[in-house]
Image (spheres, grey):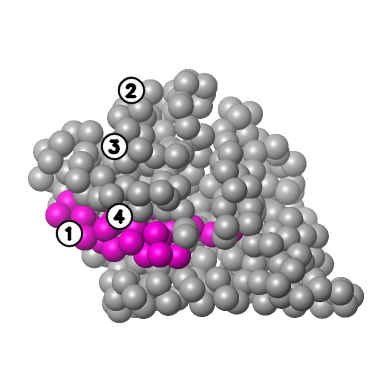
Amino acid sequence: MATTHSNRKNEHLSLATKFWRDQENPVIGPGFDAVRWVPGPLKDMAVADVQTTTHILGADFAWPFYIEAMTGGSVASTKVNADLATVAQKTGLAMAVGSQSVALKDSSQVESYRVVRQNHPEGFLIANLGADHPIQNVQAAIDMIDANAIELHVNLGQELAMAEGDRRFYWLDNLATVIAKSPVPVIIKEVGFGMGPDLLKQLSALKPAAINVGGGNGTSFAQIEQRRDRQNENPLDLSPFGLSTVESLLAGKKAAIDSPLIATGGIQSINDVVTALILGAKTTSSAGHFLQVLMTASPSALQQEIENWQQALPELMTLLGAKTVFDLSQVPKLYRADLQNFSDQF
């Protein structure tokens, strides 16, 4: 069983890299280019005046973006996680690990996750499990990497796309229990299908520390799982289902929820980060883009990419007259017709 899980992790890693390299990800709804930035009035400020910090999960972060969950649970993923953690340490970013369920089943895979804490000893690390895991497993995942927070993924679409995936989804009571008992902040996270207003209201009522909308146009785990199914045992077509990241952020505004939102799904540039913050995200994260740079170039190339983002962010904020991340949420914007149409339907 453990070998099967490790092989699946390797296939996830390989296929995710291929999809980003070959631009095979499906397009779901309006993307970040559907939001235009509107020039505002001149403000007396300098780039040096800009504060890029954001507060979420009970902590202050120097940058409003982090390295999202990617991998773990195999020999190949150990090096990837080590490289990612080293880059995160050098650039001062937080980092999430991939689902740790395989390491709970097979202790030989623990090192593929623990290496992240070893390479990023003072960093903010986010553990990762599915929404069905009991509090005992959550505690074990936190302890495994000395995590500062944990994300519980609500990956119904991914499970249904897997021939061997779950078909029972009694998650809400368990999520409430884990949120109440977890020793660290809990994030509820989607994995590529986004979230609508009703789902966001439902999840926010559970009082998580944050909700990661996990919108479309990023890495599609449904597509990855169906590509893994070489015998085509599962004919399920999920291509019409889901919301993009920008749609999900607008859904959060419509729902008027209390939980802070994290934006992930298709974030490939610092401009995408800025747009997500304009739409109300407290912070953002990227997985597929960072993985593609790492796997097709090098750790130093990924470090340079992140440093480029860090240089550009305060300059873009100055352009928009935003001295703080919160100020970005007040910046005027225009929606393309298809995104405005989406907004008008709720």
Q: Residue at x 70, y 54 (%)?
A: 280
| Amino acid type, callout 1 | Ala
| Pointer 4 local density, CA inside 10 Å: few below 14, some 14–19, many at least 20 | some
Residue 279 within the magenta-colored segment of the rendering: no
Relative vertical location of residue 176 with respect to residue 44 in this rendering, above or below: above
Q: Residue at x 36, y 78 (%)?
A: 301
* Label 3 to label 2: alpha-carbon separation: 12 Å
Q: Is residue 214 left or right of residue 159?
A: right
Residue ranking furthest to the right:
41
Q: Which residues are magenta?
A: 64-91
Mark 1 vs mark 3: give the one in front: 3
Can I make out residue 324 in this image?
yes
Q: In terms of sequence position, does the residue under pointer 2 or pointer 4 come before the other?
A: 4
Can I make out residue 248 in this image?
no
- Identify the residue position indicated by label 3 in the image: 144
- Identify the residue position indicated by label 4 in the image: 119
| Amino acid type, callout 3 | Met
Return the residue nearer the eye: 44 or 169: 44
| Amino acid type, callout 4 | Asn
- Identify the residue position indicated by label 2 in the image: 136
Residue 161 in percent (x, y) is at 33, 48
| Amino acid type, callout 2 | Gln
Q: Quadrant of the N terminus?
A: top left
* Label 1 to label 3: alpha-carbon separation: 19 Å
- Identify the residue position indicated by label 1 in the image: 76
Which label belongs to residue 126?
A: none
